[in-house]
Amino acid sequence: MVILSQQVLRTDLAGMPLEWIDYRAAARLYFLGQVAYACGEPMLTLHGGINARTREQSRLEIHSIIATHGTHQALNKLRDDYVPPLSNRTLFQRDDHLCLYCGGRFSVRHLSRDHVRPLSQDGHDHWNNVVSACVRCNNYKAGRTPEAAGMELLAVPFTPTHAEYIYLMGRHVLADQMDFLRAHFPRTSPLLRRLVRQRAAQTGERPAVAEPARVILGGCLAGDAQDAA
Ligand SMILES: [Zn+2]
């Protein structure tokens, strides 16, 4: 069952992912004629008023992914040098809630943002210099580099692309939205490798080679979303 808090993925006309919006914002875009085409599964049907002439009740089907007009303000987010804002929530999501020193998985409450090169040693508060660390490891490392503390990083920190960032921002990402976003991840995306591994673990199949480059037609996936139905 789809709950009302389910988010809709909004893309630009070319099908580049832009942001998550709630169903009200999506409905507004439909009514304003801003939705160029819909992808993904129908997610929710809204019922409106009764037409006085036809006596029919209006209904609006909201899809999980909608491509919209008039997204020029968002274009700068699609530039190669775009750096998404850094927050603990998205950082912990990026690192899959693992401490990148001891490898343990922790709740948000027990994780912290570690600066690999400490701020006191000219390290920056930037995606490429921060990792999730449990409170214990972070306290132990203190104001030292991993080398000085004799600790090893389990993964290299990276800056998410805008599509990866949207995925990290998502709550209850639907399967078709996930497939859509995945198709926009770089081939070398660590997130892509993780998703492939997770899917393999769920289905019991051998992990396939990460395949981001699915064919995208008019912004919609040529296969997946429809095949999954
Ligand atoms: Zn730890």
Image (cartoon, rainbow, N blue to C red):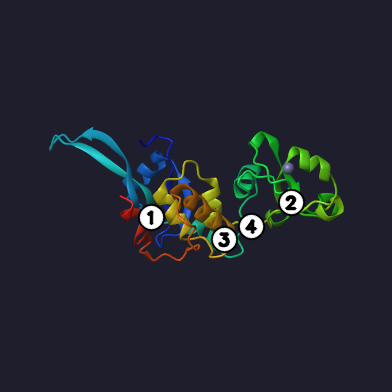
Mark 4 vs mark 3, foreground winner is 3
Mark pair 4, 3: CA separation: 10 Å
Vertical placement of residue 196 versus 98, above or below: below
* Distance in Å between CA atoms under marks 2 and 4: 12 Å
Q: Which residue is mark 1?
A: 67
Which residue is the site of mark 4?
159
Nearer-the-camera pick, 18 or 34: 18
Decide which of tag 1 and tag 2 comes sooner along the chain. 1
Check disc 2 and give the amino acid type.
Answer: Asp
Q: Nearer the viewer, mark 2 or mark 4?
A: 4
Q: Residue at x 39, y 60 (%)?
A: 13
Q: Which element type, helix, strand or loop, lies under badge 2?
A: loop
* Mark 4 residue type: Thr
Give the percent coordinates (x, y) of residue 161.
57, 58
Tag 1 secondary structure? strand
Check disc 3 and report its element: helix, strand or loop: loop
Instruction: Tell me the residue that label 2 is attached to.
Output: 125
Query: Can the viewer see residue 25?
Result: yes
Q: Secondary structure at mark 4?
A: loop
